[in-house]
Amino acid sequence: MYKYIVKRLLLMVPTLLGAAVLVFALLRMVPGDVCEVRMAGTGLYVDQEAIDTCRENLGMNDPYYLQFFDFIAGYVTFDLGESMWTGKPVTYEIGIRFELSLQLAIMATLVAVAVAIPLGVISAIKQNTWIDYFVRAFSIAGIAMPSFWLGILIILGLLITTQAWFGQPWMPPIEYVSVFEDPLANMSQLIWPAVATGYRYSAVATRMTRSALLEVLREDYVRTARAKGLLERVIINRHALKNALLPVVTIIALEFAFLMGGLVVTEQVFNLNGLGKLFVEAVLNHDFTLTQHLVMLVVAIFVLTNLVVDVLYAWLDPRIRYS
């Protein structure tokens, strides 16, 4: 197992390098640059000389191989450079938003797991009963309902409910407070986007849990366990559920990696300044430096998540062994 983990960690290097080459090349193919966007934002006439001076100061006139070398060297020297748009260090721009996005992703994942696995198991056990139909309708509604629309409904519901009960409308706080500073204020802000995102997230996992468990329950070793007279609860928990969770773990892990940078609209609805919003701002401003490092951050999260999933496979299914 240890050799396998070391081997996978070493394979991450060419994967990340390939992603770096791809994102670097694609960004340079996009028309326009940050200097044109910045000068156009002033509303005044700007001559070509001013734009050329801006590009020279930002190093955009350097040969591409030098720009790519600086891009990669930043990870070795732990200096990712400065944002072309704000002029602040990239580590600062990402750091002030990473905690929020990470906490929201973890909370949404916990909500999804807490909802999906019990409902998926119950739906499989009670197949073709009213419970199964209810769970399936609940999951289909979650797939069909966008998380940002559910977020809007949650905010409206909070406003109407608090106005009716307490005589004064209430909505989640706008300013982010770390969970280590004020847990109550932090949870009152992030619990609602976590529920909205987690419900959408759990709908897919619920259907996968149901389908996988139904397939496992038809296996020969489950019939053998029942023939031996084992309790149904023991068969489900000890023999069937772990094997059925393999595809579910994959979906949950990939969704978690996606949540780290893909909650753009949900962040807008709840006024959260996370990595998704930073992604959009960096792309709109043609901030090559910041966009490159944001993409590499998401790629690294996906690669590490896949490694964790592979390790969990061996724990969930004893038949899987890595040599």
Image (cartoon, rainbow, N blue to C red):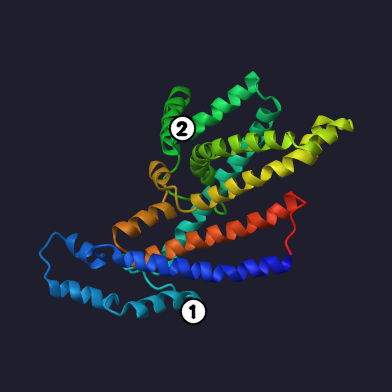
Task: Work out whether residue 171 or residue 195 is closer to the camera in this orientation and state it.
Answer: 195
Give the residue number, with chain letter if any, for mark 2: 144
Q: Residue at x 68, y 30 (%)?
A: 124
Placement of 74 over or under 249, stated as above or below: below
Give the residue number, with chain letter if any, for mark 1: 77
Say what secondary structure mark 1 lies in: helix
Q: Residues within 10 Å of mark 2 (few under 14, many from 20)?
A: few
Q: Amino acid at mark 1?
A: Thr
Describe residue 9's horizontal placement relative to residue 274 as left or right: right
Placement of 107 over or under 81, stated as above or below: above
Placement of 23 over or under 244, stated as above or below: below
Q: Residue at x 42, y 38 (%)?
A: 148
Q: Residues within 10 Å of mark 1 (few under 14, many from 20)?
A: few
Residue at the far right in the pictured view: 228
- Give the position of the N terminus as an image quadrant: bottom right
Which quadrant holds residue 116?
top right
Q: Residue at x 42, y 26 (%)?
A: 160
Q: Amino acid at mark 2?
A: Ala
Residue 115 x, y percent position in the rendering: 61, 35
Visible residue check, residue 1: yes
Task: Work out whether residue 190 or residue 240 is closer to the camera in this orientation and state it.
Answer: 240
Say what secondary structure mark 2 lies in: helix
Residue 19 x, y percent position in the rendering: 46, 65
The label number, if any, that marks residue 170 in the structure image: none
